[in-house]
Image (tube, rainbow, N blue to C red):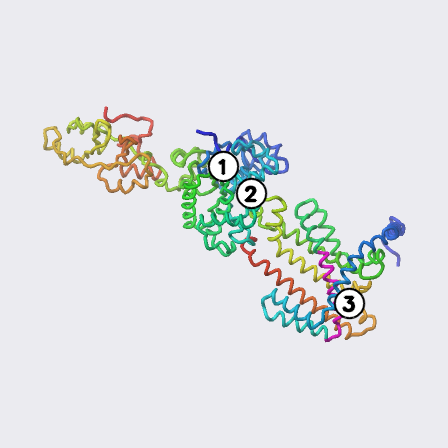
Amino acid sequence: MADNFPDLIDMRAVRSAIDGWFNGIVSIYGQALETAFLPVLRLLNGIEAFLLWVPWFVLIPVVALVSFAATRDWRMPIAVIVMLFLTGLLGLWQPAMATVALMLTATLFAIVTGIPLGILMSFSNRLQAVMLPILDVMQTMPIFVYLIPFVMLFGPGKIPALLATIVFSVPPLIRLTNLGIRGVNPEVIEAVTAFGATPMQKLFAAQLPLATPTIMAGINQTTMMALSMVVIASMIGAGGLGYEVLQGIQRLDVSRGLFAGLGIVFLAIIFDRLVQAYGKRVQKHLDAGNT
Amino acid sequence: MTDPKIRIEQVSKLFGPNPQAALPLLDSDATKAEIMEKTGSIVGLRNVTLDIAGGSIFVVMGLSGSGKSTLIRHINRLIEPTAGRILVDDTDVVSLSQAALRDLRLHRVSMVFQNFGLLPNKTVIDNVALGLRFAGAGKFRARDRAMQQVERVGLKGFEMQYPRQLSGGMQQRVGLARALATDAEILLMDEAFSALDPLIRHDMQSQLLELQNDLNKTIVFITHDLDEALRIGDQIAILNDGSLSQFGTGEEILLHPADDYVKRFVRNVDRGRVITVTAAARKMPTITSADISIDKISRLLVAEDARTVFIVDEEGQPTGAISAASVAHHAAADDGYWREPKHILPVTRVSSDTILADALSDVAESEVPVAVVDERGRMIGAISRQSALEAMTGTDGPSSGSQRSISGPHQRSAAT
């Protein structure tokens, strides 16, 4: 069956031009980039090593305590203990910690880059006009597409997996930081300005604190998206729970895939509830002023 | 008069994509809607010129959209004018650098907002200390000074609460304390009490007046409520569609509204609380005590078409009154000479700057009209029940009637 759309331009030439350009970049900068990201790899490995170094019977109570501190509700630590214990029971402790390490590192970098970008975006309508379509593309582009250039630059491994996870998970945080700051009660901003605040004082005294609930929602989404990326990231060597799922697919091993999937669900529930509870506590005093 | 504290000179503000293009139209008689249609610019202010005296409460009034909130924001340059100058103590606010402008906002002009504008994540004391912290004061020093203001507005004991834990009136007292804490001489209050219940609003007005007695700040107060304006304002400016309609004391505006827009405002106001007895007083026939005779009194009563003749001494101070009824009674029986001092009725006097409402009970109780006297006790006129009612409802008495307004065009001494 013939292709019914005419070949107006020679796509092979365009594609080979793009491929050639990118290959050039890889050959020129590949090595330098790999060195540059070495500290990031060390951080990721450090977190993973630490999580595995802490005995499970210490880690589970600590997470349970943190969850109680965040929620002030006794049901939460019980759920945390049960879920983490089950994860261990299913033989997934080690991959689960690898996944948590990847997710935490990705979230950390997403926060460090995403919040400042969101702040800048909230200050400039022009930057917002440029950024919004870029963020749209970042969020709709199939995840696998990110993997290709990162793998080419760094080779399979944890660094490309981490970078792809960051790129995939940072857009909601940028979006919501921007939205949160723009949504701050204008009268409060006007009041702060009228009392002589510098732009920095305005940002730290009013805009960021009042936008915190929205920013926390962004962080929550970022952690969830980072977690959802782990299966795909495992295809390029991230390891962790995703790798277990992948093995399940490759070997048609239903139980293996199912258990690893459950492990991911448990982690997702724990992080989601923790971040949400923390966000609510931050929000406690903000009700009156943010209407 | 000394130099004004704040001077607003020919300030215009246009909102829109190309404000400068619409500027020449402001001098024409094009209306706000016409300018909008022609240029796409919205008129915020139109050639407003105002002098605001130091140490006074200056009220800017108007309906929503009249530009009053826009005007007040020019004083601390939260809004930049399209044309004109704003002088604060002879400093041209428009030409200030960012640093100098910040200095103005930190130390010289502070502001209270309609919906309070408090930081919900900070306690009362830290909200009050906000301006001091921005000025670089240490946390504890700032709290120390803020605490004095918290006490001044009567919120001692609430300093560690968060704004959402307080009622609206209390939140606005936090806003007021925050504005006072910077020791700025100028206080801008943008519909500061409009979001409050009527009773709370009244309390806040009283508190503001008390504070003003102690502090003697220059207060620019925005409101859409004429009763509020009349109660607290030393001077009132009325804005309509960005232009100044009228400017004067409350009484001037009530008694001589400049145009229909001002009249509409004035219509429903409780005039008795604002106007003085002078505005309600009418010229009365008077006679000196040496001159009393039935004949003269009768002729005066007929000539002036009056019901009462006041007796004044040589200085012009009222000493008593004779009513038409007792004259008629005597005229029938007597030989023309007044020999009955007991029929001279006592006269209640009120000084000419008394608020009409405060004199009403005297007017109601007195048998004869209440005499209005100047600072030396001389009689200016008198308020009858009828003239009091006329003044309070804003209707003028019949022009050919028995009593003429003393401020009317045809003043004539009744004693001649």
Marks 2 and 1, Cα distance to the nearest angstrom?
A: 26 Å
Q: Does residue B397 belong to the magenta stretch?
A: no
Q: Residues within 10 Å of mark 3 (few under 14, many from 20)?
A: many
Q: Main secondary structure of the magenta part?
A: helix
In the image, what residue type sits under mark 1? Asn
Image quadrant where one finds the C terminus of chain B: top left
Q: Position of residue B191 (x, y in %)?
A: 48, 44
Residue at the spot of label 1: B240
Q: Secondary structure at mark 2?
A: helix
Q: Position of residue B316 (x, y in %)?
A: 24, 28
Instruction: Tell me which amino acid carries mark 2.
Output: Ala
Q: Residues within 10 Å of mark 2 (few under 14, many from 20)?
A: many
Protein chain holding label 3: A
Residue where numbered disc 2 is placed: A194
Rendering quarter of residue A237: bottom right
Where are the magenta residues, as a range?
A89-110
Is residue A92 inside the magenta stretch?
Answer: yes
Q: Chain of mark 2?
A: A
In-front residue for pair A125/A234: A234
What is the distance, in whole Å, between disc 3 and disc 1 at their CAs?
70 Å
Q: Which of the two labelled residues, at mark 2 and mark 3, occupies the earlier sequence position?
A: 2
Instruction: Give the camera-side residue of B262 and A72.
Output: A72
Pointer 3: what residue? A240
